[in-house]
Image (tube, helix red, strand yellow):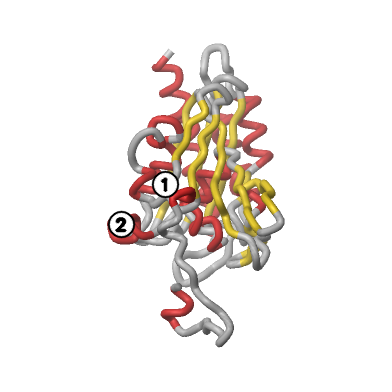
Amino acid sequence: MVALNHGSQRIGPDELVVSLKDVPELSIIEVDHEQRFLRIGAGVSWDELLGAPVDTLVPCLTQAARTVGSHQIRTAGTIGGNIATASPAGDGVCALVALDAVAVLTSPEGQRRVSVEHVATGPKRSVLANDEFIESIEMPIVDGWQAYSKIGTRNAMVISVAGVAVVLSANSNSCRIALGSVGPTVILAEDASAFARDSIDWSTIEISADSLERIGELVQQAATPIDDHRSTAAYRSHSVGVLARRLIERGVQEMRNST
């Protein structure tokens, strides 16, 4: 719709734009306590992600939702739209990649599941076929700590200059670090995540200052940012390293204090 309003895209004489807003199956939020996963319909708005049960089960997604646009945008915009837009600056996508979420894609041929990490293939490009839509997003419920943080050119209603989501799992003693706005797609910083996992003393929930510094360096190495009108590549690279280091330090401290 942004492209249509801007005039950079046209609707052909044999094409239609169809709103899925009133399809109730796309607006569900379901919790499977036995299997420990959360299912969110692609039509769920950002405002609906701010409350229960999302805010308690996957708080980094709620934190990301809170940073999206204005109240009007959060009321109209949806989590499915954020994924399908395939923007590397997608706040919700960054949180979902850290959460190891899966998108359920539906077409007349049936369904297929694709990791949210792999839905986008580049800026504004995705694996979605012409006859597919995103029906829902599924993600595991992780016991531990998680958060999302971003930097913008101002404090509100801003596209992310750099974003980081961190999920620390106390059950599997694992870490996932996702980076937004520093590559053609949202990036899972695999080396930094693995190093963080191995550097945290999970018995005492502690991590050394040297390890935190190294995590920041590995995050910077994973980033492949560009210069554009919002920021420079150098600033973006520096920012995600700082954000990741701060988030993990805070996460480890809060997990330790809660035990």
Quadrant for residue 198, please give it: top right
Labels 1 and 2 touching (C-beta < 8 A): no
In the picture, the quarter occupied by the N terminus is bottom left
Give the residue displayed 53% in from the left and 63% down from the top: 85
Q: Measuring from the top left, give residue 79's x and y in whole percent.
A: 47, 52
Which badge, 1 or 2, is on the more N-terminal residue?
1
Asked if residue 257 lies left or right of residue 115, the reply is left
Number of the label disc, if any, that sits on residue 156: 2
Q: Which is closer to the viewer, label 1 or label 2? A: 1
Residue 61 visible in this rendered orientation of the protein? yes
Where is 146 relative to 77, above or below? above
Q: Which residue is mark 1?
A: 64
Q: Residue furthest bottom?
A: 13
In the picture, the quarter occupied by the C terminus is top left
Q: Measuring from the top left, give residue 76's x and y in whole percent.
A: 36, 60
Nearer to the camera, 240 or 148: 148
Asked if residue 239 lies left or right of residue 199, the reply is left
Where is 59 relative to 152, above or below? above
Q: Tell me the crowding category of disc 2: few under 14, some 14 to 19, or many 20 or more residues within 10 angstroms, Cα based.
A: few
Q: Measuring from the top left, give residue 54's x and y in whole percent.
A: 41, 36
Q: Measuring from the top left, give residue 207's x and y in whole percent.
A: 54, 23
Q: Residue furthest right?
A: 109
Q: Amino acid at mark 1?
A: Ala
Callout 2 secondary element: loop
Callout 1 secondary element: helix
Quadrant for residue 190, please give it: top right
Give the residue displayed 44% in from the left and 57% down from the top: 160
Asked if residue 128 lies left or right of residue 75, the reply is right
Where is 120 relative to 208, above or below? below
Give the residue displayed 67% in from the left and 50% down from the top: 111
Q: Amino acid at mark 2?
A: Ala
